[in-house]
Image (cartoon, helix red, strand yellow):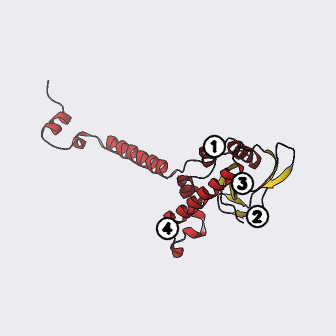
């Protein structure tokens, strides 16, 4: 049996493509283009925020539950992490504009450090205490292209004795695509 032209091409060191028909080459190019497009879309797709809640009340209740357990890791999970801040928030912040000359690492580092310090203070003051959420209020909102930041967050709560008070637990909440997450635990004076 005579060897096929494709095996001759391989044996002689010629590219395998010399044995392909024009239709096969077009098909390979289309497949390669589809794969490249799929890969580029997959690489640019930002995953949704993790550990979100469907309402500010649901998120506030989760924060209060973690606070009652003195669960620092749980509280940190309810807040934006570095990847979420970089992918969802940073591109739309005025600080991200090149003319501002503020690197992401600086802005994130400042926010993360202040939030961690505020969380430490919050846990030392309120950790282990159980509160019932009555309502969540905000003093102001800031709208961005794909999200809204609700600032100066206040939890109106009832303690174990039945006394009602306002509790400043986190500075801001982030709302995006109908989901809610703690922006940071930094609370202004």
Q: Which of the two discs, 4 and 2, labels the residue nearer the N terminus?
A: 4
Residue at 16% x, 43% y is 14
Residue at 14% x, 42% y is 13
Residue at 60% x, 64% y is 92
- Residue extending farthest to the left is 12
CA neighbours of label 3 inside 10 A, class few (<14), some (14 to 19), many (20+):
many
The Cα–Cα distance between marks 3 and 1, rounded to whole angstroms, is: 14 Å
CA neighbours of label 4 inside 10 A, class few (<14), some (14 to 19), many (20+):
few
Can you identify the residue that label 1 sits on?
71
> Where is residue 19 shown, x and y percent of the image?
23, 39
Label 2 or label 3, whichever lies nearer to me, is: 3
Q: Does dot 1 land on a helix, a strand or a loop?
A: loop
Residue closer to the observer: 187 or 18: 187
Q: Which of the two discs, 3 and 4, labels the residue nearer the N terminus?
A: 4
Q: Does dot 3 land on a helix, a strand or a loop?
A: loop
Can you identify the residue that label 2 sits on?
140
Q: Which of the two discs, 3 and 1, labels the residue nearer the N terminus?
A: 1
1 and 4 marks in contact (CB < 8 Å): no
The Cα–Cα distance between marks 2 and 1, rounded to whole angstroms, is: 28 Å
The Cα–Cα distance between marks 1 and 4, rounded to whole angstroms, is: 32 Å
The Cα–Cα distance between marks 4 and 2, rounded to whole angstroms, is: 27 Å
The numbered mark at residue 103 is: 4
> Where is residue 30 shown, x and y percent of the image?
40, 45
> Where is residue 105 shown, x and y percent of the image?
49, 63
CA neighbours of label 1 inside 10 A, class few (<14), some (14 to 19), many (20+):
some
3 and 1 marks in contact (CB < 8 Å): no
> Where is residue 179 shown, x and y percent of the image?
68, 48
Can you identify the residue that label 3 sits on?
169
Q: In which quadrant of the rendered view does residue 89 lie? A: bottom right
> Could you tell me which quadrant the C terminus lies in?
bottom right
């Amino acid at each position: 049996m005579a060897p096929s032209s494709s095996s001759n091409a391989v044996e002689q060191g010629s590219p395998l493509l010399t044995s392909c028909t024009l239709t096969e080459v077009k098909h390979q190019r289309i497949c390669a283009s589809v794969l490249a497009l799929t890969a580029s879309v997959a690489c640019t797709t930002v995953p949704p925020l993790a550990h979100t809640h469907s309402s500010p009340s649901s998120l506030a209740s989760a924060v209060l539950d973690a606070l009652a357990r003195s669960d620092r890791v749980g509280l940190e999970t309810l807040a934006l992490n570095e990847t979420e801040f970089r992918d969802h928030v940073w591109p739309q912040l005025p600080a991200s504009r090149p003319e501002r000359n503020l690197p992401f690492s600086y802005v994130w580092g400042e926010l993360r450090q202040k939030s961690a310090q505020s969380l430490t203070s919050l846990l030392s003051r309120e950790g282990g205490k159980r509160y019932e959420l009555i309502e969540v209020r905000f003093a102001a909102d800031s709208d961005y292209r794909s999200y809204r930041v609700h600032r100066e967050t206040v939890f109106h709560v009832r303690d174990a004795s039945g006394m009602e008070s306002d509790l400043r637990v986190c500075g801001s909440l982030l709302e995006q695509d109908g989901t809610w997450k703690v922006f940071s635990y930094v609370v202004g004076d």
